[in-house]
Amino acid sequence: MLELNYPFDSSYIIKKKKSIKKALLSENKSRTAKKIAVFGGSTTSDIVKTMELFLLDNGIEPVFYESEYAQYFQDAMFPSEELLEFKPDIIFIHTSQRNITNYPELTDKKEDIDAKFDTELGKFKAMWQSIREKFRCPIIQNNFEMPLYRLLGNRDAYDIHGRVNFVTRLNNAFYEYARENEGFYINDLNFISADYGLRSFSDPSYWNMYKYAMCFDAIPYFAFNTANIIKAVFGKNKKAIALDLDNTLWGGVVGDDGVDGIEIGQETGVSQSYYEFQAYLKQLKSMGIVLTVCSKNDHENAIAGLNHPEGVLKPDDFIIIKANWENKDRNIIETANELNILPDSIVFADDNPAERAIVRANVEGAAVPEMEGVENYIFTIDRGGYFEAATFSEDDLKRNEMYKNNAQRNAQMASFGDYGEYLKSLDMHAVIDDFIPVYLARITQLTNKSNQFNVTTKRYTETEMEEVFASDSYIRLYGKLVDKFGDNGVVSVVIGKINGDILDVDLWIMSCRVLKRDMEFAMLDRLVERAREKGIKTIRGHYYPTAKNNMVRNLFGTFGFTKVSEDETGNTEWLMETSSYEKKNNYIDVKLNNE
Amino acid sequence: MTGREIFTRLNKVFQDVFDDDSIRITPATTADDIEDWDSLEHITLISAVEKEFRMKFKMKEVTSMKNVGEMAVIIAERATK
C-alpha cells in the first residue's frame, strides 16, 4: 500500500491507522501468520498497532502478545502460563535508555562503574538466556538511544562517568552478543532516533504523560524499522532491483542528449548525485542484490549510457538489461521469469510517476518506491528496508556471479539440440548428505525464502533448525551443486520425520535456479538410500497448496509416488514403498560430505 | 477562524481517528460519548488535532480538558492553520 511505503506521512498513518488496517484486511492477499511477543519497557500500544500495518502490508499476519506496562523483565524471566502457551515465533524486547536504572554517579570509582555496567548488562543477558531456554525463538532487542542530556557536555562521550559513554559501552556489549549468537537481532533504536532527530524523538512530555519512549510522530518510523527485521527474518526480503536509466541512473535522456550530454560523474552537483546513487547500487550488488535494467530506450543507447566513462555501473553489473519500448510491467514480469524469482521479489526504481503507476497496478507485490529528486534516491531505497540483511551468508555474496553463470548456461543450452546432451555437457557434481554446521545458516535461510519449489512451505527459525539438526528422529539432506560454470552453493534441502517405518517428508525445497537439472532426483536417490538404512518401508509425501507453489503440485507424482488422498483445499498425500525404488538421477555425479 | 469552522474540521479529525463517519461532536462531547475514546486513543486524537491546526497543547491542558468545547477554545487561541 502506497501510504505505507517509505517515505510515508507519519501523522497520516497515526490518524488513519484504523481505516488503513481495514483496507489491508479487505485485500485478497495470502499472508503468513506469525506470533509476536512484545516485551515492553515503556508503552507499546501504538507501536504494536502501527507495526501491524507494516507487517500486513508485507505478507505477514501478526498476532501479538503485549506485556503489561513495563513488565519486560518479568515476562522474559518468569513467563506466565498464558505467555508460554502463546508460543511466540519471535520476541521483541522494546527497551530504551529510560530503562537503565544504574547510571554512573560522578563520585563513582572505576570499579563502581564497572559493577554497574555488569549489573545492567547482566540483567539483559539473563533475559536473553531465559528466552532461549523457555521459548527457543529469535529475539529482537533494541539497543539504547543516546541520553537526554550531557552533564559533562562533550566530555560525556568519553568520560567513564558520562551517560553517553555508559550507553555506548552497553550498546557495544549488545553488538558483541549479536555477533556471537544466531537468531538474535539488534533493532537500531540509536540510529532511528538520530535519523529522526534525537531532541524531538526523546521529547520528555511523551514519557512523562504517556510513558512512551519516543514522541508520537516517531512511532511509525520506529515500528517500520522493527517490522523490517521481522519480515527479513521470515523471508520477505526483496531480491532484485530493476532500474530505469534516464533521470534515474543519470540526468538527462541518453537517446536525445547523447552519451556526452547525460549528467553523471564529478562535474556538477547533479551529476555527483547520480554518481553517488550508482555507487550505492554497486554496493547493493556486492551484498548479493541483483541489478537489472528496465528502461524505455533503444538497446544500443542504453548500453552507450552505461558505458559512460564517468559512471560507476557498467553493462556487466546488470544480470538482465531490458531496454526496449515494451510496457514496463511486462518487462518486469519477464525479468522475474528469467531470474526464476517471483515478481513480488523485485523493487522497481523509476523517476517517472506514470511508469510507477503502471507497474504498481499490474505487478502484484512488487515494491515501487516514490523516486522523487535524485538527492533522495539513496534514502528512498535504503530507508525503505527492502534488503534488510537479518541473515547474511556466503551465498549472498556470490549470488550475482551465480545469476551470471546461469545466463551462460542458457546460452549453452540454446546450442544443444538434445536436453540430455546439454545436461551432460554441464559436468555437474553435487554433495548430498546430512547437514553440517557450516551450512546451517544457509539451510535455514533457504527454508524461509523458498516459495515456489516448496511442497509444505514449512518455515524454520534458526533455533528450530538447530533442534532438527540435533535430533535422531529426522533424515536431513542438503544438496550443493557445482557445474562447469560455477558453484551454485546449497540449493536444496529435504527433511523427513521418522515415524516408525514411515518417513514423513516435512520439507522439500529447491532453489529455482537449478530447475530441470536432475537435482531433485539426485536428492530423492539419497533420501531413499538413507531411508532404507534406517529400516523405513514407506515414504509419505505431503503437498499443501499456496499461491506460489503450483510448480510442485505433482512433484511426488513425477517421483513415482501414488496419491492416496486429497482434501477440499487441495492438500494431497502421497506414498511410495522404498523397496521398489530405482535410482533416477542420470547426469549428476554425487558425493558425500567428506569425499 | 470561526467556531463553526473549528468544529467542522475537528469533527473530521474525530471521524478519522475513530474511523466512524457517524460521529457528530458538540461542545459538550466527552470521552464517555465515543466508544473507542480511551486513554490510549486520546493520545492519537491529541496528536491528530495538533497536526490539523498546526499547534501544540500544553502538557497540563492535555489532561485537564473536560470536553470538546474546552479543546475548541484552546484551538481558537492558538491555531496557526
Image (spheres, coloured by chain):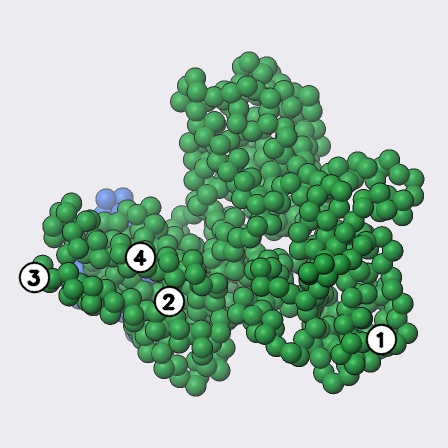
Chain colours: A green, B blue
Q: Quadrant of residue A510?
A: bottom right
* Circle on res. A171: 4
* Circle on res. A93: 2
| Residue labelled with disc 1 | A578
Left of A268 or right of it: where is A112? left
* Circle on res. A107: 3
For the point 78% across and 39% down, which residue is it?
A: A410
SS type, badge 4: helix
Marks 2 and 4 belong to one chain: yes
Disc 3 and disc 4: Cα gap in Å? 23 Å
Marks 4 and 1 belong to one chain: yes
Where residue A323 appears, as percent x and y from the top left, is: 67, 29
The foreground one among A182 and B77 is: A182
Is residue A423 visible in this depiction of the protein?
yes
For the point 65% across and 23% down, which residue is it?
A: A303
Q: Residues within 10 Å of mark 1 (few under 14, many from 20)?
A: some
User: Which of the two labelled residues, at mark 3 and mark 1, occupies the earlier sequence position?
Assistant: 3
Q: Is A389 located above or below residue A547 in the figure?
A: above
